[in-house]
């Protein structure tokens, strides 16, 4: 069985105070397979490199918004442990094609 999306990234952001998530950023986050259980944190499964994903997402943030931050971490082969809904672990297992806790 082949993996449809070879990378899984943890994407988190902080927008300047009183700013809501831009419509374009939210749409960019949900273009591929995704899970979202924690405010401002998304898990994205994609065939993009981390650089490609960063460029696609950061383009949705206004360059003049100096209070906005974006962090992307590749968790494809990382150890992972946490208290999350079973649906999240099942989704992640399906994306990675490996057994997770």
Image: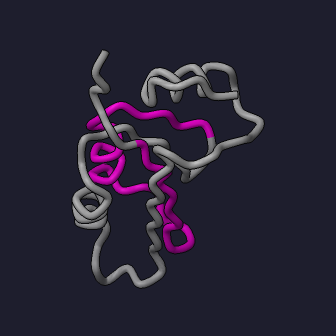
- Camera-nearest residue between 86 and 49: 49
- x%, y% of residue 23? 32, 50
Q: Residue at x 45, y 24 (%)?
A: 97
The residue sitting at the top extreme is 1
Q: Residue at x 47, y 66 (%)?
A: 71
Residue 23 in magenta stretch: yes
Specify the quadrant that holds the N terminus.
Answer: top left
Please state the extent of the stretch shown in magenta in the rendering: 8-37
Q: Is residue 32 left or right of residue 93?
A: left
Is the residue 33 above or below the residue 52 in the image?
above
Q: Quadrant of residue 63?
A: bottom left
Q: Residue at x 37, y 37 (%)?
A: 45
- Camera-nearest residue between 10 and 15: 10
- x%, y% of residue 95? 42, 27
- x%, y% of residue 92? 52, 29
Q: Is residue 58 left or right of residue 19?
A: left
Residue 17 in magenta stretch: yes
Is the residue 69 above or below the residue 40 in the image?
below
Colour scheme of the picture: one colour
Is the residue 9 above or below the residue 85 in the image?
below
Q: Residue at x 29, y 43 (%)?
A: 27
* Count of marks, rendered view: 0
Specify the quadrant that holds the C terminus.
Answer: top right
């Amino acid at each position: 069985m082949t993996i449809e999306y070879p990378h899984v990234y943890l994407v988190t952001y902080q927008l300047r105070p009183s700013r809501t998530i831009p419509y374009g950023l939210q749409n960019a986050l949900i273009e591929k397979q995704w899970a979202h259980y924690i405010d401002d944190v998304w898990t994205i499964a994609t065939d993009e490199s981390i650089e490609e994903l960063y460029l696609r997402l950061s383009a949705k943030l206004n360059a003049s918004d100096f209070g906005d931050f974006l962090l992307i971490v590749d968790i494809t082969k990382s150890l992972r442990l946490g208290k999350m809904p079973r649906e999240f672990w099942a989704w992640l297992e399906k994306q990675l094609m490996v057994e997770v806790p």
